[in-house]
Amino acid sequence: MLISLPALAAAPAPMDVAKPSKGAVELSSGVFSRVLTAGHGTERPQGDDCVTVRFTSWRRDGTVVAMSGAAAANQCLATAMPGVVIALKYMSVGEKRRVWIPAGLTYRPEDQPEGPALTLDVELVSITTAPRPPADMLAPPADATRLPSGVVYRVLRSSGGASHPTEKSRVTVQYSCWTSAGRLFETTAMEGRPASVQVGMALPGWREAVPAMAVGETARVWIPADQAYGAKPSSKKLPAGPLVCDIELLKID
Amino acid sequence: MQNSLLVASLFTAGLFMGDLTLQAQVKPYILTRYNDGGRSGANLNETVLTTANVNSNSFGRLFLLPVDDQVYAGLLYFPGLPMTGGTHNVLYAATMNNTVYAFDADSLGTGAPLWQRNFNGTGRPTTNEDVGGSCANYQDFRGNIGIVGTPVINPTTKTMYFVTRTVESGGTVQRLRAIDITTGADRTGSPATIGATVAGNGEGGSTISFNSLTQNQRPALAFAKNTVYISWASFCDTQPYHGWVMGYDSASLAQVGVYNTSANGGLSGIWMAGAAPMFDNAGNVYVSTGNGSWNGRANLGESLIKLQSRTLKLMDFFTASNYNSLNGSDMDFGSGGPTAVPGTKYLVTGGKEGKLYLLDATNLGKIAAGDAQIPQVFQAVNTTARPSSTHHIHNANPWWQSPQGLNVYVWGENDYARAYRFDTTAQRLVTTAAVVGPVLPPVGMPGGMMSISAKGSQAGTGILWATLPRYGDANQTIVGGELYALNAETLALLWSSTGPNEDYFAFSKGSNQIIANGKVYVAGVSKYIGVYGLKSSGVVAQNKAYLKTATGSTSCNGTETPDKAVNGTWSGGNGDKWCSQATNPTLTIDLGSVTTVSRVVIEHAGAGGETFDFDTADFTIQLSTDGANYTTAATVTGNVVCITTHDIAPVSARYVRLNITKPAANGDGSARIYEVQVF
């Protein structure tokens, strides 16, 4: 059966797809951009925020690489192309920009030293703000409680409750954890959906700290590397070194 | 525009496609991966298990069925099968040692199967050291690589089809087997050695020949209209490889169709994390491909491909418009397999981006910028809980017509389980999840391997079953497994396998559990099939070490004592293990009386949620009848696996002693043992 291949219905490349045009400003690292439509508000994506965007990307020869289509695409800055991250941090909600990203700051095919240079039209639709790393994440205050393993915790909000989970408990929590570099590792805060956690299968630092918490309490827990994923975790997907977690113990399941 | 509700469904939902005899019966025939040709993943004839009785009080592990090797292939179930000696509900399992088992699905008995047969012949299974060179130290499979793809059964002839993989005289041979499911005997024409050649310049010449060494027979086999279909991917993208589909006549085993996904290029494997090709009522075949070459003709990487029944001529395709960036970032479109939207002309498929694509099977759409030509695509796996992690969809997405509406279930990496509602008026999925579960899986691969059981659409009967790693990333390693039961209407957690002796041990990625007649069957890679059900049907006390007297070298502290290693659990945290910092520590278990010992399973640090670096590296297992004179039954050095299974020539023993000479691979001086189970 012969299948006729329709011509790819390409989003037409802009006239200045090949290189930054008059009015484009270098943001950093060779990334240039030009505002097409102004946005509103003062909030800018930063850190580990996630955004929804509409975009079209082209190679410098005008070949379409990807499009979000009618529906906006979800993108967390932590996993976005480096050049896109640079641009997004300048944008406000509703803003449209044309961005020229040099090779090396886009995606990188496995068999090539660097990816292609790209030109993107991107519209910032919304920002989901990631919880910011706590100010005292590198050094717990002197009045924090130190546990034998080296885990340190401090009650941020007391509940006055007396019900404590054990290591055998399953609990419902809201929490955020950051690495010592201040990067967000995981959080329930952005979706706002609590998680059910088997305490005994959580990080060693959690196994010690959570039973010390009362239901309804919020605590900040400083977890040394050997009570987290270790200095050299078995998987590169896991954060190395110490972690800091803010944990709100909602209930014992 | 036609009212889609008036269009006859292209897919059968429920029973096995093409067999009218079975459609007249109400039995849970699970003869193919994900239950039926449309891949609903649902047994809708479950009358025993409900959301009311699946809880820690009344539901749990009944027994373990022993097999000779790891199980990655999915399980199959044939109810009421007349065999020599009686009629049985039969559970079928296939192992990485190229062995097929037929078990009585309802009782352990002596542990012996109804029949078993090994298909190594004069060869041996491939091992992980033979393949996967692109990953240097390939560990995605560890040990033997024999039967990987889920077999399929022709109900009319009662024939099972599967692919064996052996190394013979230095070369790799893959064979299609067709066996009588009542005896294991080969059918006429079986086995058929697998091979094919197609025109193509992808490897420098003018043809492409099937490479039995590099091609990984990962997806489930599929059967429709007297044709058996087999598909292939790779081991860790080790080249040269292509995506292949081959069709064989189910009676003669003559090859009737061949398709290559990248004949003028390379890669584009059909992987689907073990899922099966999908069928429509015409018997046309739908598969998804991963990273690889694309030119819209001979090369269709990152695509959903429709092939003509039997001939496997290319009929249609859809390619993700961002295939270049998918290729560039190793975000395979084809990490999941397609499943039909029941009662419609649509199908869904998901990939490593965590997007769900809704496609029209009558017009897949080929390729267009922004995927604007297809009915729908949206981000189904939420990325915000772990924003720097991956959010892949693996295996496939089951469907259930719940009392609230038609749901498709997604449990992607690093996200909660979600049910998305299909709006039958709009003929689109509602992109906000109808319900969301409470459990985040461990960081890493693969997300939840899901199945559904229900009594039709009756309220209170729908259960979403899922196996996940209990800790750790299942990519390139072996991790402990956990079985979950969620209320399929609300995704509330009903039960998980953390109770005493509810273990099925190590997680089998890509093998989803099956549910039939009140029992849940779970394959693992610790040489056991876990069988779960209502405890009232009888829990078999198999673990001879459970709650027996355990003594050991000085414990790390007052809670991490020897008794914790025989309490049947692994999930209770630091206090649920035995720990010792003694030099060459020992742990001795008194079984109470002399008994026959043939297998010991040990759960090390990683099985209890600690770093895998703490897994016991060097140790011996010794046995004794009198507690004074011991014989070494197993010697292990350089262990890096969190759950180890040790087969022993059956011997009488009362005492089992674990001698640890190197507690951890990283040099840590503490021995950490969560469980020792003796069989």
Image (cartoon, helix red, strand yellow):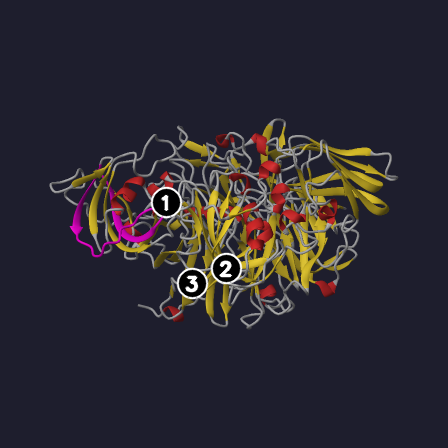
Q: Nearer the viewer, residue B177 or B78?
A: B78
Whether residue B237 is visible to the viewer of this picture, yes or no, is yes
Q: Seen in the image, is A208 located left or right of residue B624?
A: left
**Which region shows up in magenta?**
A31-60
- Picture disc at residue A78: 1
- Residue A42 shown in magenta: yes
Distance of label 2 from label 1 (alpha carbons) = 30 Å
Q: Position of residue B483 (x, y in %)?
A: 60, 55
Disc 2 target residue: A217
Which callout, 3 or 2, points to the residue nearer the camera?
Answer: 2
Q: Nearer the viewer, mark 2 or mark 1?
A: 2
Identify the residue at the far top of this view: B170
Mark 1 crowd level (few <14, some 14–19, many ≥20, 10 Å Cα): many
Q: Which residue is mark 3?
A: B433
Q: Is residue A166 left or right of residue A52?
A: right
- Chain letter for mark 1: A
The chain ID associated with circle 2 is A
The verdict on a common chain for dots 3 and 1 is no
Classify A188 as above or below B162: below
SS at mark 3 in the image: loop
For residue A33, above or below residue B415 = above
